[in-house]
Image (cartoon, helix red, strand yellow):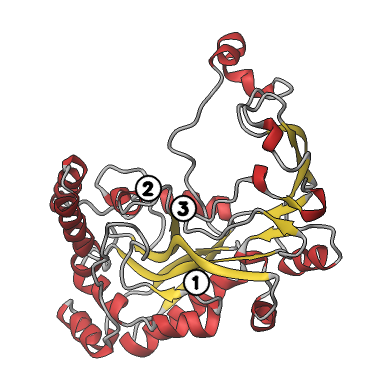
Amino acid sequence: HRDLHSFPTRRSSDLLAVVPRDAIERHGDRWLLELPVPVSGAYQLAAWRINDRIRLSRNPRYWEAGQTRSQVIDLLPCISASTALNLYETKAVDIVWDKNLVPVDLLDLLLARPDFHAYPVLGTYFLRFNVTRPPFHDARVRRAFAMAIDKERIVTRITRGGEQVAHSYTPPGIGGYRNPEGLSRQPEVARQLLAEAGYPGGTGFPRFEYLFDTSSRLQEQIAVELQVMWQRELGVRSELRKLEWKTYLVAQGELDYDVCRSSWMGDYNDPNTFLDMFMSHNGNNRTGWHEPRYDQLMRQANAQLDPSRREQFLQQAETILIREAVPIVPLYFYTGLEYYDPDRIEGIYPNLRAEHPLRVIARKSALP
């Protein structure tokens, strides 16, 4: 069973994980260098060849090893969509799990095939403002930029994978939570807000940079579209700054940007995994935004046992985030795109978290 697998966006690690105390006590911080690596999951590391593959083998010590379907799984790194498709078409790989590995030019044709699968996931593509840098320290400017964006054009003309326009930051489908509405597209109001901030028709507005990464051609296409929208609707001019992924993350974390593209995939199915990151001292904030009212509402929500009261606190906090202060602008919700032949592969079930336990996946010919 070969599995071509990578993630479309940066995703935070699991909040909690079991680690082997005895191995850590024996080897200290070098316990991960021991072979075989002591793990409690269904698979253990058999080999890792840089830029080639990670090979996993069934872990005989796993509590349900007898139910682990595949004996060996290879994970292949890949950054080229055309290469990924060629590997799949020649049956060198069985599964591709990454929207960035779907050739954009062929998307309409591929989505019509029964072995290409699209479904909503718990993830949001959004913009961050560096609120410590003028003129983006002014919430009127941030709201103006948000209301000048045609999100529908972005999902229909650029992403084209069935993405849903984001009217909130938290994605739909989270149980027990009704998403509040953010700012809608209103170019006239946007121009009025910019004039109130001292930049009528964009006059006097300084050139600014829009930061994005090189993870896929899609990032540059969205950057160019935003650049055109802001100039057409607001009369402001931006410069595009493209950085390799790791350098981009450093620049974002150090607030070395004006406006930048960003994304978040939920760690768990709850609004808190999206909203707590913009509390004042959260390391994932990366906007420079600090709002005591927001922090207090989040603390009240986290201390609330009544689900309806908790929902109200979270809704109030999200309203501040996406309607009032606007340190971020949600653009669209991610769609999971993956390709595999359901006549050959069994054990994959679309879900909001885009989680697919490898131990239940196998070629149908390998099933008992």
Q: Name the outermost residue toward the top.
A: 26
Visible in this render: residue 50?
no
Quadrant of the snapshot with the C terminus: top right
- Disc 3 secondary structure class: helix
Q: Residue at x 28, y 84 (%)?
A: 202
Between disc 1 and disc 2, whose residue precedes?
Answer: 1
Q: Residue at x 25, y 64 (%)?
A: 178
| N-term mark: 3 or 1 | 1
Q: Closer to the observer: label 1 or label 2?
A: 2
Label 1 sits on a secondary structure element that is: strand
Task: Name the amino acid type tagged 3.
Answer: Ala
Q: Position of residue 346 (x, y in %)?
A: 70, 56
Q: Say above or below: 289 vs 229.
A: above
Residue picked out by circle 3 = 251
Q: Amino acid at mark 2?
A: Asn
Circle 2 packing at 10 Å, graded few (<14), some (14-19), many (20+), is: some
Identify which residue, 364 or 333, lies in the foreground: 364
Q: Which residue is mark 2?
A: 284
Which-is-in-front pick, marks 2 and 3? 2
Residue bearing mark 1: 240
Give whichever of 241, 152 is nearer the camera.
152
